[in-house]
Amino acid sequence: MKAAIIAGCVVLSVLSAPGAHASEYYLALCGRKLVYVLGHHGYSFSQIVDGNERELPSRLFRWDASDLYFRGHKCQLTELSNPPEIRK
């Protein structure tokens, strides 16, 4: 009986795993740039300029442990619990 319950739990956890999406959202102050960072299967970086969202190349950013660097300068990170609402 225990084995059946454990097997059922394993099957349910495997089936629910593909639907689970863990994303990270940060606001980063990198010099004079305010950057939105989205972490989900890698990181993407975007900036809002005059109401338009502009994606920034990821090659300009580097993670070192838990610190983010933009063109060699350390950014100040603030973790967000929800994605930022971007209004156009």
Image (tube, grey):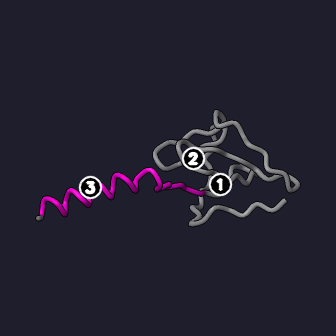
Inspect the magenta stretch and tell me whether residue 19 lies in it.
yes
Mark 3 Cα-neighbour bin, 10 Å: few <14, some 14–19, many ≥20: few
Q: Secondary structure at mark 3?
A: helix
Q: Secondary structure at mark 2?
A: strand
What residue is pinned by disc 1? 28
Residue 2, percent from left and from top: 12, 64
What residue is pinned by disc 3? 10
Location of residue 30 with respect to 78 vertically, above or below: above
**Which amino acid lies under the numbered mark 2 shown in the image of this protein?**
Leu
Say whether marks 1 and 3 touch (CB < 8 Å).
no
Farthest residue to the right: give it: 50
Residue 60 is marked as none
Say whether marks 1 and 2 touch (CB < 8 Å).
yes
Rendered-image quadrant of the N terminus: bottom left
Task: Name the residue rendered at 59%, 57% in the picture.
Answer: 25
Inspect the magenta stretch and tell me whether residue 45 lies in it.
no
Q: Which residues are magenta?
A: 2-25
Mark 1 Cα-neighbour bin, 10 Å: few <14, some 14–19, many ≥20: many
Mark 2 Cα-neighbour bin, 10 Å: few <14, some 14–19, many ≥20: some
Q: CA separation, marks 1 and 3? A: 39 Å
**Which amino acid lies under the numbered mark 3 shown in the image of this protein?**
Val
Rendered-image quadrant of the C terminus: bottom right
In the image, taking residue 71 as reference, residue 20 lies left or right, namely left
What residue is pinned by disc 2? 68
Q: CA separation, marks 3 and 2? A: 37 Å
* Earlier-in-chain disc, 1 versus 3: 3
